[in-house]
């Protein structure tokens, strides 16, 4: 296992100093929190129900772990990032990077991040960032987040785990001449990747991302089909794979936000058979069946159940608090909201919600895939 950059030390490093993109999870009891998306009030309510004080201290020494997507959509992304960063710096919390966080780090302008990148008016309930200093502060904090956390009984990523993708991001063993890096093998995109040793592991995430983007662009240029090209750029880039998950070709194009798409998100957990429990967010899940659009990814699965074969070795804990801005826009300003913020208590295996509800984690009894034969169901309105 690579030596961890201790959080306290990490906080003192600059954004371009090397960091480990895959880091160890500390031992001891954890509370793993789903996508927060700027909903600072929900975060405060949740940590109170979990027994933390407002400074993030727990009487029994528990630690918070965040699955990423700390920002966008909700009213106060800045407060969320500052609060979590203070805990990380004190060694009391950890977080991995989500695709929304990565977009800001890369300066990639999206519909949801006008509040910080300034290319369009803020969407949802997001407040505009006042100045360059604030943008710099938030970006620097997010840029230092790792992509994956692991220990013997647990893995944490934002969207998807893939052994090859993770290996491609580990630093080379000390003293080794780094062999060829590998890229994720999903079976969906064509081409067995031949990675470049320089893309491995230790480094600033922006530099590593750019290297993989260039690499996959060259791979895509070798095939002629534009859908295959897109799938290569998504599935063969380990950072994209981990932060936004694998995709596959669908038989019939479907529409999202007025655009026809031929690629849909894959239920990667249907093929996640071994290894420790993998906890992730990203794919909007709802306590009320059918309440949010998520491409039917969880069709057939219980609202509080693990996913995949062997009793379910994967669990999505994004209960869609990022949808709250839509609920408010529709006139529900006081709640209760359909979109919730959840935490998975570990090793207790209990889900705790910002409304105070506590529900035992259920284990998938379907023996594997919950519906269909492969991948995701195409559907309208899926949001990434
Ligand atoms: Mn996400």
Image (cartoon, rainbow, N blue to C red):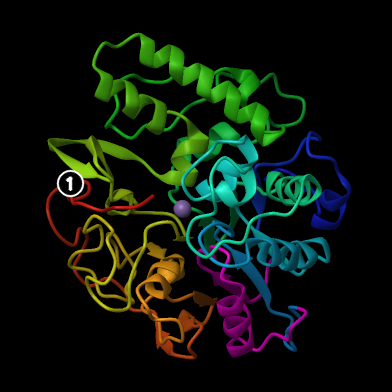
Q: Tag 1, which secondary structure?
A: loop
Image quadrant in which you'd find residue 340: bottom left
Magenta residue check for 101: no
Image quadrant in which you'd find residue 201: top right
233 relative to 103, above or below: above
Bin the neighbour count of mark 1 within 10 Å (Cα to Cα): few under 14, some 14-19, many 20 and up: few
Quadrant where the N terminus lies?
Answer: top right
Is 324 or 274 nearer to us in this picture? 324
Does any portion of residue 111 appear in the rendered image? Answer: yes
Q: Residue at x 74, y 83 (%)?
A: 54
376 relative to 291, above or below: above
Magenta residue check for 46: yes
43 relative to 95, above or below: below
Residue located beneath label 1 in the image = 374
144 relative to 314, above or below: above
Residue 17 in the image: state x and y as whole percent. 81, 35
Left or right: 313 as drawn, with respect to 102: left
Query: Is ligand 1 closer than 8 angstroms to the Cβ of mark 1?
Result: no
Residue 174 in the image: state x and y as whole percent. 76, 30
Left or right: 131 as drawn, with respect to 371: right
Image quadrant in which you'd find residue 205: top right
Residue 330 in the image: state x and y as whole percent. 35, 73
Q: Residue at x 55, y 36 (%)?
A: 108
Residue 65 in the image: state x and y as whole percent. 62, 66
Q: Which residues are magenta?
A: 27-55
State how many labels appear.
1
Q: Residue at x 49, y 56 (%)?
A: 123
Left or right: 146 as drawn, with respect to 191: right
Does any portion of residue 319 appear in the rendered image? Answer: no
Left or right: 306 as drawn, with respect to 238: left
């Amino acid at each position: 296992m690579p030596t961890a950059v201790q959080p306290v030390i990490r906080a003192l490093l600059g954004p371009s100093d090397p960091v480990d993109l895959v880091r160890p999870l500390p031992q001891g009891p954890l509370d793993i929190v789903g996508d927060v998306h700027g909903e600072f009030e929900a975060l405060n309510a949740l940590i109170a129900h979990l027994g933390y004080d407002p400074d993030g201290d727990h009487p029994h020494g528990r630690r918070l772990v965040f699955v990423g997507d700390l920002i966008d959509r909700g009213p106060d992304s800045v407060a969320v990032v500052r609060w979590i960063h203070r805990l990380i710096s004190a060694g009391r919390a950890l977080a991995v990077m989500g695709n929304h966080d990565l977009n800001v780090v890369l300066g990639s302008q999206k519909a949801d991040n006008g509040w910080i990148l300034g290319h369009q008016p803020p969407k949802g309930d997001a407040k505009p960032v006042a100045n360059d200093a604030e943008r710099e502060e938030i970006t620097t904090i997010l840029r230092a987040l790792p992509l994956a956390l692991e220990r013997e009984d647990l893995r944490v990523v934002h969207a998807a785990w893939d052994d090859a993708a993770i290996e491609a991001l580990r630093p080379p063993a000390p003293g080794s001449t780094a062999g060829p890096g590998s890229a994720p093998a999903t079976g969906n995109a064509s081409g067995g990747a031949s990675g470049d040793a320089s893309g491995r592991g230790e480094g600033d995430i922006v530099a590593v991302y750019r290297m993989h983007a260039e690499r996959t662009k060259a791979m895509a240029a070798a095939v002629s089909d534009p859908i295959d090209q897109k799938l290569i750029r998504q599935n063969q880039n380990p950072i994209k794979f981990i932060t936004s998950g694998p995709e596959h070709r669908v038989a019939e194009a479907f529409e999202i936000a007025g655009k026809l798409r031929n690629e849909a998100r894959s239920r990667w957990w249907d093929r996640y058979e071994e290894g420790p429990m993998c906890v992730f967010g990203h794919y909007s899940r709802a306590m009320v069946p059918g309440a949010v659009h998520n491409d039917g990814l969880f069709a057939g699965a219980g609202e509080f159940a693990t996913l995949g074969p062997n009793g379910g070795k994967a669990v999505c804990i994004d209960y869609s608090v990022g949808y709250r801005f839509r609920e408010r826009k529709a006139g529900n300003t006081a709640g209760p909201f359909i979109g919730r913020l959840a935490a998975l208590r570990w090793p207790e295996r209990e889900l705790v919600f910002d409304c105070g509800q506590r529900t035992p984690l259920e284990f998938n009894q379907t023996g594997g895939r919950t519906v269909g034969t492969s991948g995701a169901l195409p559907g309208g309105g899926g949001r990434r």
